[in-house]
Image (cartoon, rainbow, N blue to C red):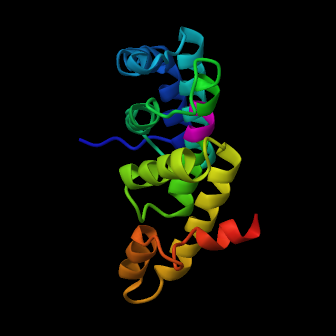
């Protein structure tokens, strides 16, 4: 039997699980410690709060820590993260992830979005969250415009994988 639940009640239930979720985040230190990065209990709790707020603001539901885990696993190897900025950067990445996951209307998978974010953060914009966000904004606009036309998925894949003059980010670089 399925029970309907009010969205606000769902968020309240999620909030009651915060300590358990923060403990799950702390387990991910086993992965990130290899790169000299760990979260404190306070930072783990803060990350869970950021997740809950981002979910609420984007009208999304998530019962597990899937995106949090995927972001930590992907970004802990970044050469631009240090013990001094790790927690804060993860919070910013999580907010951006949920915002653009919603903006893109789930047209790309979590892993695809996280990989794009990582590529922009690590390779294209050398650790700049602000520039990465601008890049994701451009991609979001491009995908939202192109996905309404036939054959657009082929065009987008080509644009994202092409390193020549037609590369999606070349226009951005010309503005710098």
The overriding secondary structure of the stretch rendered in magenta is: helix
Bounds of the magenta span?
Answer: 90-94
165 or 10: nearer the viewer: 165
Residue 3 image offset from top left, x and y in percent:
34, 41
- Quadrant that contains the C terminus: bottom right
Above or below residue 26? Residue 49 is: below
Q: Residue at x 37, y 87 (%)?
A: 151
Above or below residue 7? Residue 156 is: below
**Residue 169 in sight from this viewpoint:** yes
106 or 1: nearer the viewer: 106
Task: Reply yes or no: does residue 93 show up in magenta.
Answer: yes
Above or below residue 105? Residue 14 is: above
Tell me where residue 26 sits by quadrant. Answer: top left
Judge from the rendering whether residue 2 lies leftward or rightward of residue 169; answer left or right: left
Residue 36 image offset from top left, x and y in percent:
47, 16
12 or 152: nearer the viewer: 152
Tell me where residue 161 sits by quadrant. Answer: bottom left
Above or below residue 83? Residue 12 is: below
Tell me where residue 138 sits by quadrant. Answer: bottom right
* Residue sticking out furthest to the right: 176
- Quadrant that contains the N terminus: top left
* Residue sticking out furthest to the top: 41
Judge from the rendering whether residue 41 lies leftward or rightward of residue 67; answer left or right: right
**Residue 59 in sight from this viewpoint:** no
Q: Residue at x 64, y 24 (%)?
A: 85
Q: Residue at x 54, y 10 (%)?
A: 40
* Residue sticking out furthest to the bottom: 150
Task: Reply yes or no: does residue 121 show up in magenta.
Answer: no
* Residue sticking out furthest to the front: 164
Residue 160 image offset from top left, x and y in percent:
44, 69
């Amino acid at each position: 039997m399925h029970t309907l639940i009010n969205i606000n009640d769902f968020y309240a239930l999620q909030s009651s699980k915060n300590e358990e979720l923060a403990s799950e985040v702390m387990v991910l230190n086993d992965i990130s410690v290899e790169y000299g990065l760990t979260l404190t209990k306070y930072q783990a709790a803060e990350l869970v709060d950021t997740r809950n707020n981002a979910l609420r603001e984007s009208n999304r539901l998530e019962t597990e820590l899937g995106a949090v885990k995927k972001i930590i696993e992907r970004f802990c190897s970044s050469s631009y993260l240090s013990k001094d900025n790790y927690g804060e950067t993860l919070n910013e990445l999580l907010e951006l992830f949920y915002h653009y996951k919603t903006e893109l209307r789930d047209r790309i998978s979590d892993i695809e979005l996280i990989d794009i974010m990582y590529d922009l953060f690590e390779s294209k914009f050398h650790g700049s969250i602000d520039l990465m966000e601008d890049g994701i904004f451009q991609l979001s606009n491009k995908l939202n415009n192109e996905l309404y036309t036939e054959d657009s998925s082929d065009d987008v894949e080509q644009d994202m994988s092409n390193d020549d003059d037609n590369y999606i980010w070349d226009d951005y670089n010309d503005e710098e």
